[in-house]
Image (cartoon, helix red, strand yellow):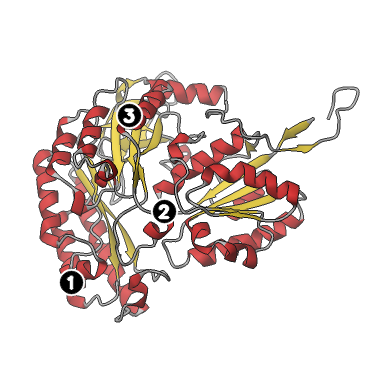
């Protein structure tokens, strides 16, 4: 007789990693494990969360401090493992794909190392490591199956990621992702739509189409218009209320996609369009095959088609060779673009990328000073954009985990159609209080740079299938996923005593 072992997954990095982690959780639960507490955010919370028997690090290799962060956490887990006989530690994701055998050499207490292309192998590798009592390292170079084809333990009953492609064909000089996730591989449209319809049947009402470069979707089967067609097809899925996607690339973004966004009722008026730099010289050095005027032209056409669209971006400061003039060009583009938000980064040298060996590496102090100027500008412009919402009504889909102070302030938070974060006052009366997944109209009373507040009662509360799914999952937690015949992982336990007590 065996009892279920427990697990926790610690996720670093991008939405692709979040998506992969849901699959990792689904695989482990199909193999007979159960999660301890909520998703872990660091090694300490994983260790403290009831003493998980299996701790999985799903890693990111994009930032320079990724190595230090991983090995620091693994060092912490070595001490935890000494006090927890039978514990297993696994490392997956981009850092595992990059470092391979190095991880086990630096942290010999790690039991499994698996790559970005063989997530589905994790349960078997864990079992093999347990039986053979030695570390298992399995890194494959080609994708074995799309993450979306694996079992899943979704964190949200009403919202889901749907992978349209994996990998990237671009050669940006600062990016290590193509080397770790490989060339772009596209799913067939019918498979994507079948997954969306399956999710909707389970109560999901919002999906985010996910890929390293979503609007290059179709390159593998020779259809340049495939992504626009996919967006329009989403409009025909009954019960699907909101469709988002991330991330596109300016070089592949077509007017057909803009038209599909504007004309498809459930595609949200929101666009994340990475800029990286406003300097044409820096863009050339980055191998970003667009220039600032082309980029701004895309934004102009998006706003002509969807005047209320919220546009966000990614920007890198301090790329090798960036001059003060180059940086000023970035500030100028930001002024003209008027982003709803921007994810700003200081350039991080990654070994193995062309940029790491470029001359003109910008001193840290210079990069920091420019970064602070950029953040000040971005926040000021975002605040101005948000202030325009004061007194206006917006439709909000409420969600868990969006507002850290919701319980203290008697608020519930969620996202407007354009993905702005909204904190709304809600009633104590269960009949008037929205559930996560429910939708209501709120009037904005106050704006901040990164969110909107509503301090008046919500109106037009709509109970949704997504809210029903959340309530059902809350009242009767059940394992999600499709069985794949994976061997169950277990550990021997003492037979029960005669009186039935363990």
Residue 77 as seen in the image, left or right of residue 372 = right
Label 3 close to label 1 by CB (< 8 Å): no
Which residue matches tag 3? 190
Is disc 3 surrounded by few (<14), some (14 to 19) or many (20+) residues within 10 Å? Answer: few
* Residue 340 percent coordinates (x, y): 23, 49
Whole-number angstrom distance, CA of label 3 to CA of label 1:
41 Å
Residue 118 shows which numbered tag? none
- Answer with left or right where residue 322 lies relative to residue 435: left
Q: Report which residue position mark 1 lands on.
A: 281
Closer to the camera: disc 1 or disc 2? 2
Q: Nearer the viewer, residue 187 or 427?
A: 187
> Where 61 sits versus 6, above or below?
below
Left or right position of 259 against 209: left
Q: Residues within 10 Å of mark 2 (few under 14, many from 20)?
A: many
Q: Earlier in the sequence, mark 2 or mark 3?
A: 2
Quadrant in the picture for residue 422: top left
**Mark 3, secondary structure of its residue:** helix
Along the polypeptide, which appears first: circle 1 or circle 2?
2
Question: What label sits on residue 181 in the rendered view?
Answer: 2
């Amino acid at each position: 007789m065996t009892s279920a072992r427990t697990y926790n997954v610690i996720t670093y990095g991008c939405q692709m990693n979040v998506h992969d982690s849901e699959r990792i959780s689904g695989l482990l639960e199909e193999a007979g494990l159960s999660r301890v507490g909520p998703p872990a955010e660091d090694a300490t919370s994983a260790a403290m969360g009831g003493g998980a028997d299996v701790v999985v690090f799903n890693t990111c290799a994009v930032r320079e401090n990724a190595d230090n962060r991983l090995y620091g956490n693994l060092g912490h887990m070595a001490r935890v493992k000494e006090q927890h006989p039978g514990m297993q530690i696994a490392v997956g994701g981009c850092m595992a794909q990059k470092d391979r055998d190095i991880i086990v050499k630096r942290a010999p207490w790690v039991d499994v190392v698996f790559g970005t292309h063989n997530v589905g192998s994790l349960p078997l590798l864990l079992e093999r490591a347990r039986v053979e009592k030695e570390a298992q390292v399995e890194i494959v170079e080609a994708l074995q199956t799309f993450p979306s084809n694996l079992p899943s333990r979704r964190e949200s009953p009403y919202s889901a990621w749907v992978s349209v492609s994996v990998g990237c064909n671009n050669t940006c000089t600062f990016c290590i992702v193509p080397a770790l996730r490989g060339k772009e591989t596209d799913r067939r449209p019918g498979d994507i739509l079948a997954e969306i319809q399956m999710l909707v049947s389970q109560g999901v009402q919002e999906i985010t189409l996910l890929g390293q470069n979503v609007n290059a979707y179709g390159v593998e089967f020779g259809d340049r218009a495939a992504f626009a067609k996919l967006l329009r097809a989403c409009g025909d899925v009954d019960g699907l209320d909101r469709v988002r996607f991330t991330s596109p690339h300016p070089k592949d973004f077509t007017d057909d996609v803009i038209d599909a966004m504007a004309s498809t009722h459930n595609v949200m008026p929101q666009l994340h369009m990475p800029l990286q730099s406003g300097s044409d010289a820096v863009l050339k050095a980055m191998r970003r095959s667009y220039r600032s005027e082309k980029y701004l032209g895309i934004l102009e056409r998006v706003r002509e088609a969807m005047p209320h669209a919220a546009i966000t971006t990614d920007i890198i400061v301090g790329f090798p060779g960036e001059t003060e003039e180059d940086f000023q060009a970035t500030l100028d583009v930001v002024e003209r673009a008027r982003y709803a938000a921007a994810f700003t980064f200081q350039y991080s040298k990654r070994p193995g990328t062309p940029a790491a060996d470029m001359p003109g590496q910008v001193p840290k102090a210079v990069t920091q000073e420019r970064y602070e100027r950029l953040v000040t500008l971005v926040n000021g412009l975002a605040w101005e954009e948000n202030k325009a919402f004061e007194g206006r009504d917006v439709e909000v889909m409420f969600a868990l985990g969006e507002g850290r102070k919701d319980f203290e302030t008697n608020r519930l938070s969620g996202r407007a159609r354009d993905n702005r974060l909204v904190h709304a006052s809600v009633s104590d009366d269960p009949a008037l209080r929205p559930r996560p997944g429910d939708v209501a109209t709120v009037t904005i009373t106050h704006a901040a740079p990164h969110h909107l507040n509503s301090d008046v009662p919500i109106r037009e509360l709509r109970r949704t299938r997504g809210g029903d799914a959340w309530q059902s999952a809350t009242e009767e937690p059940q394992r999600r996923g499709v069985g794949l015949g994976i061997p169950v992982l277990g550990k021997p336990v003492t037979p029960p005593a005669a009186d039935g007590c363990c």
